[in-house]
Image: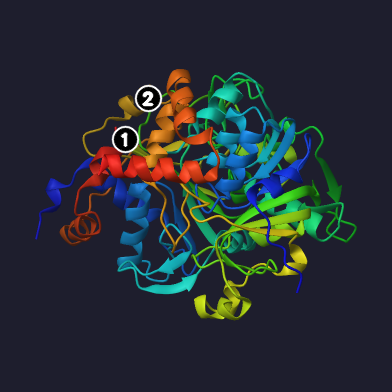
Amino acid sequence: MTDRVLGIDDVVGQLQPGMTIGVGGWGSRRKPMALVRAIARSGLSGLTVVCFGGPDVGLLIAAGCVKRLVTGFVTLDSIPLEPHYRRARQNAAIELTELDEGMMQWGLLAAAQRLPFLPTKAGLGSDVLAVNPQLRTVRSPYADGEELVAVPALRLDVALVHMNRADAGGNGQYLGPDPYFDDLFCLAAEQAFVSCERIVPTAGLMDGGAAQSLLINRAMVSGVVETPGGAHFTSCVPDYGRDEAFQAEYAAAAGDEQAWASFRARYLDGDEASYQHAVRASGAESR
Amino acid sequence: MTGASTATIAEVCVLACAQAWRGNGPILASPLGLIPSLGARLARLTFEPELLITDGEAMLVAPDETVEGWLPYRDVLRLVATGRRHMMMGAAQLDRYGNQNISAIGDWARPTAQLLGVRGAPGNTVNHAVSYWIPRHSPRVLVARVDMVCGVGYDRAAAAGISAPDLRVVVTDKAVLDFGSPDHSMRLRSVHPGVSVEQVRELTGFPLGVPDDVPVTPVPTGGELDLIRRLDPGGRREAEVG
């Protein structure tokens, strides 16, 4: 089995300005935040980001990486609205392709199945069609003749997802209650990179969870990175829950230019190790 | 046992939300917000024991949190398309024909206030039953025209040539409303105790259908109140209404 273990910077090194990047997880849940932080540091620009949006969107927007966002929502879950995203939209600083959640799933599935589109009822009658003039409808060729939305394939150059465990070959395992759409993001992408809490021997994967926890197999993956705490501050149960105190600190800072500058200097300007160190120091302080 | 006369408006709203799911049977009840969540659980514990409810993550649970099934997001989206769901959504704006906006206020291209995004509202409203929970009945929420149609209302569905949506009730902190008028425009079904029809009219940003007789929204019985208070012992429900 080929060893696909990479470092965070190796993954970022594979990315280019203008790429379309899918980010796994959902809202503020199991986001590949270590990889997102590294992209934000790298200064990559002109990205199209496809995701069920959370603080990944906020961090990438704040760093000026995002040209276009493709999503159905952006939320921090326990904090409903994402301050960086709100400001960017209210200043028309990014382009947005706003899709229904089911259309997102269908677009990723169409890409994964190498189809040009998949039909759905979702979107009909709504302003999703009005704000996305590129969307087309298609008429059923069968007797019903029903008109449906043709959701175009959301083809990704790169997918980034975060798993609880993986092996060195790139087989990925989630141990929380929800796989989200991480396997679909990987299948819809030319290249998929999996970050994980811990790389374990292949023989150890089944010790951690049932067969169906093995969400991602190495045919879907180009590289795997061990990033302990790599989903922080989003949830990564059962390894850790969302760091609500830190998320609140993030959201407060994101709402104010000066506060954001000092947040960035304290946590984000250094590498992942210094981020994790600063988070531990901040946690120790507040205790 | 607590007397029914002591029910708060929040508790009246819990029961009104619960009633939305009456007769629904074994479908997924998806409440958004605390009071609709308490309502779904109250319905499940009393007159609608077949309802399916999630823990807010991926597990289907009984009101006592006993796990009975698994429903991650991918399967929620699959279930949506089968129609076997009745969701109670919120709305930043809701108009006379039930068009709902949770995406953005103002011009979509450069909104004055960016909100969550359309989420699943377009798909929900064309696939299954939907009700709305409006914790603060106001002409800023119940508007003549929404800025962005996320959830599809009756007039927009008709204009698009698709089946009429299945919008059941709108529960607010002042009243219960529905779309039972001949043209499916919103009408008043009942007012909560202590609220007048005139007040509801004034707080609504469009002409409201008002029948000759407007009953008072039913108040929870003593037994129902006990259940509500057991489901929310900290009384967080009181902070959710106007």
Q: Secondary structure at mark 1?
A: loop
Decide if residue B149 is in sight here.
Answer: no
* Residue at 25% from the left image edge and 58% from the top image edge: B231
Circle 1 crowding by C-alpha within 10 Å: few under 14, some 14–19, many from 20: many
Eyeballing the image, is B156 above or below A33? above
Residue A7 x/y as whole percent: 65, 52
Eyeballing the image, is A65 above or below B36? above
Could you tell me how many numbered marks the image carries? 2
Q: Secondary structure at mark 2?
A: loop
State if disc 1 and disc 2 touch (CB < 8 Å).
Answer: yes
Q: Quadrant of the C terminus of chain B?
A: top left
Eyeballing the image, is B216 above or below A261? below
Residue A270 x/y as whole percent: 53, 36
* Residue at 35% from the left image edge and 73% from the top image edge: B66
Q: Amino acid at mark 1?
A: Lys
Residue A175 x/y as whole percent: 51, 68
Q: Earlier in the sequence, mark 2 or mark 1?
A: 1
| Quadrant hosting residue B154 | top right
Residue B208 vs residue B72, the one in the foreground: B72
Residue A84 vs residue B9, the one in the foreground: A84
Q: Amino acid at mark 2?
A: Leu
The CA span between labels 2 and 1 is 9 Å
Residue B174 — which label?
Answer: 1
Residue indicated by mark 2: B203
Residue B91 x/y as whole percent: 48, 36
* Residue at 65% from the left image edge and 27% from the top image edge: A64
Left or right of A146 in this view: A283 = left
| Quadrant hosting residue B212 | top left
Decide if residue A267 is in sight here.
Answer: yes
